[in-house]
Image (cartoon, rainbow, N blue to C red):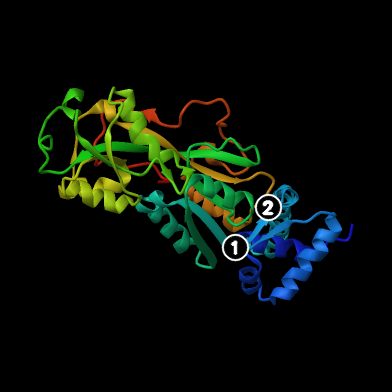
Amino acid sequence: MDMELAHVEALVAIVRSGGFSQASASVHLTQPAISRRIALLEKELGAPLFERLPQGVILTEAGRAFLPHAEALLAKVRDGIEAVRDVSGTSRGTVTLAVVGTLASTSLTKRLRCFREEHPGVDLRIRTALSVEVSALVLRGDAALGLRYNLDPNHSLVCSTVHQESLLPVCSPGHRLGKARRVQLQELAGERWVAFPPRISGVYEPYSSAIEQRLAAVGIATPDIIPIDSLTAQKRMVEADFGLALLPESSVREELEAGTLCLLPVPALRATVPVVLVHRRGAFLSGATQALAAELSGGLGAARLGAQGPRADGAGPGLRHAAGPRTGRRRSGPAA
């Protein structure tokens, strides 16, 4: 078989950009040149890879079967390039980190700033996505590391829990429960909640369902939820007394200290979600990548690169009830 890497790159470019003309622009080739590469690849494989439709192109069954192998091949090539470039320890190179957007509002940013200060020669790039998309970016080599919620059951990924993010019930200072010293669960009946949509763009996000899981666990089966897909917007809505919320502790610390949000004294509602560091099994990890992983793990043994943490196979939900009361002023863990 005499398959050329450029032909495989053309296939992946078409899939990711959404068409032949878009792909030609992304790889700086003419559309006839892209079409020629696909034709040669289809001839080599002995099957059509795209179905041409009036509204564009879609992968055939053969194309869908070949795509993950094409992405894995390109990821391995990038591994090889990084291995060759990684001749100066951790002081140089590019590292891409894929991260769930809500984590960007936590102390993760402090960790990233520390990494940049300690490794000024490393080009650190950040991509935000949902948890399932973070895993996909890592699997196809578009990101060396990923931070997501909950363990991923895919055995092609090595998962390490680096932090348990606490979720705290909060309300506006002007809410009827804002000054209560203790709130009984029945007092929450009929309250409106501000939360992420359970599914964003048709993709399941573990953190999004946390509030419904926790409320269901304490007997509130059908909560009235206002879906808002921005963590910052959720905080502003709660401050304006549009509803209650269950939010990451590290993201509301400033508001709790400033008094613009109040902690609801309902211990049964407190929970934690695992923040997980992922990388592709068997991938080359440059010195810069390992340095970033060490910074994100904060020295936790479970997050040592190359050592696989607990798997999600057969495990229960990632959301856990938090044991014991905590305050909004408590210092959170290292990675989130």
Q: Name the residue under label 2.
A: 284
Q: Residues within 10 Å of mark 1 (few under 14, many from 20)?
A: few
Work out whether residue 305 or residue 148 is closer to the camera in this orientation and state it. 148
Tag 1: amino acid: Gln
Work out whether residue 52 or residue 215 is closer to the camera in this orientation and state it. 52
Report x, y in % for residue 310: 56, 31
36 on left or right of 263 = right
What residue do we see at 66% from left, 72% from top? 24
Q: Mark 1 points at which residue?
A: 55
Report x, y in % for residue 16: 61, 60
> 52 above or below 238?
below
Report x, y in % for residue 196: 35, 44
Outermost residue on the front side: it is 54
Contact, CB < 8 Å: mark 2 with mark 1? no
Q: Residues within 10 Å of mark 2 (few under 14, many from 20)?
A: some
Which quadrant holds residue 324? top left
